[in-house]
Image (cartoon, rainbow, N blue to C red):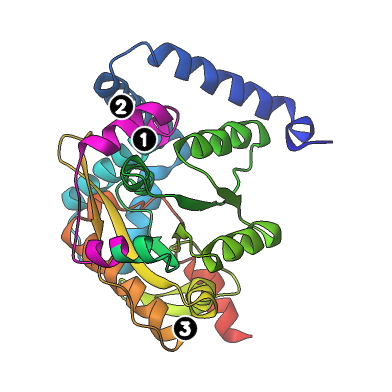
Amino acid sequence: MNDTEQGSRGERFADMALNAYIAVTGLLPVRRRLALTSLLVRRLAAPALGWYDRVADNLDFVWPDTPAKRKREIAERAIDNLARALIENYDPAEMLARGAAYPVTGPGLPVLEEARASGHPVLLITGHYGSPICARAALVARGYTVAGLLRPMSNPFMNARYIRNYREVGEPVFEQGRRGTIGLIRHIREGGIAAVAFDVFESSGTLIPFLGQPAPTALSFADIALKTDALLIPYFGIRRPDGFGFDAVIEDPVPHGDPLEMMTEVTRRLEVRIEADPGQWMWTHRRWKPKRVAKYREE
């Protein structure tokens, strides 16, 4: 039995509704499609799902002195960015065309170009900031083969299309899990390039300060870079103020060393981006889970 055969009726209905929305809005010019999706998510979905409250809770946890008006501004921009990222994933061809139109820059770009030319393995690493998939599309549009590692969606019907869309941007794509990790490591070890996001709550992770508060963080990506001799290069897809354009920025590689020190540096690079433009980060994510972290410390 495949994954889609295991889904519930509710999950199937949700997938059908999403597909209908994608089909209808797909008739609109892309800028209008993104703007409409942002409006609907911010005004209807986000309040119903408690996203504004979650953003406020996260901001109170890390930046408790943030004025209420500023918190609302950050929430509006973060949810706008999330809505746009969600809908643009469903038009891989447009994303690749946009990727070819916008620049790839940064101090690490010459290093990445040299690594591709020589066949040296590279692990590109980022957070849920701006639009990482647009940055990947920008590289693919320029002839790079960039593998992706995805965390499966809980709805199996939606997940099937999500994976398919990601593959249409560029192969190979690996789903998170033992088999996917093995495939990712093999791809990198053979001289490939892969892109991953690290800033999710990892229950078995090591506590690394993130925006001033301890956040359980996996060290596995640093371990993979060390085992495969891959360059560990932070990258970001920074959305422009118009909500459509973006800049793919490739940073300097993180030096190899102790895995904890490497992931602490990766975290610091993301912190710098968030502090410069907090509305681009996914504040709706439960990154810290302070009650659970406190329980870990008691054990």
**Residue 29, position as x, y percentages in the image:** 28, 16
Q: Which residue is mark 1?
A: 83
Q: Secondary structure at mark 1?
A: helix
Tell me if label 2 and label 1 are in contact, CB under 8 Å: yes
Q: Which residue is mark 3?
A: 259
When asked about the image quadrant of residue 117, the answer is bottom left
- Is disc 3 in contact with disc 1, using a CB cutoff of under 8 Å? no
Question: Would residue 97 be counted in the magenta stretch?
Answer: yes
Pointer 3 or 1: first along the chain: 1
> Looking at the image, which residue is at 66% across and 58% down?
177
Query: For this view, does 154 lie left or right of residue 140?
Result: right
Q: Identify the mark nearer the N-term, 2 or 3.
A: 2
Question: What amino acid type should be assigned to the residue bearing mark 3?
Answer: Pro
Residue at position x 32%, y 47% in the image: 135
Q: What is the span of residues highlighted in magenta in the rendered image?
A: 86-113
Q: Residue 65, located in which quarter of the rendered image?
A: bottom left
* Image location of residue 25, percent across then percent down: 39, 15
Marker disc for residue 34: 2
**Could you tell me which residue is drawn at 29 percent across and 45 percent down?**
78
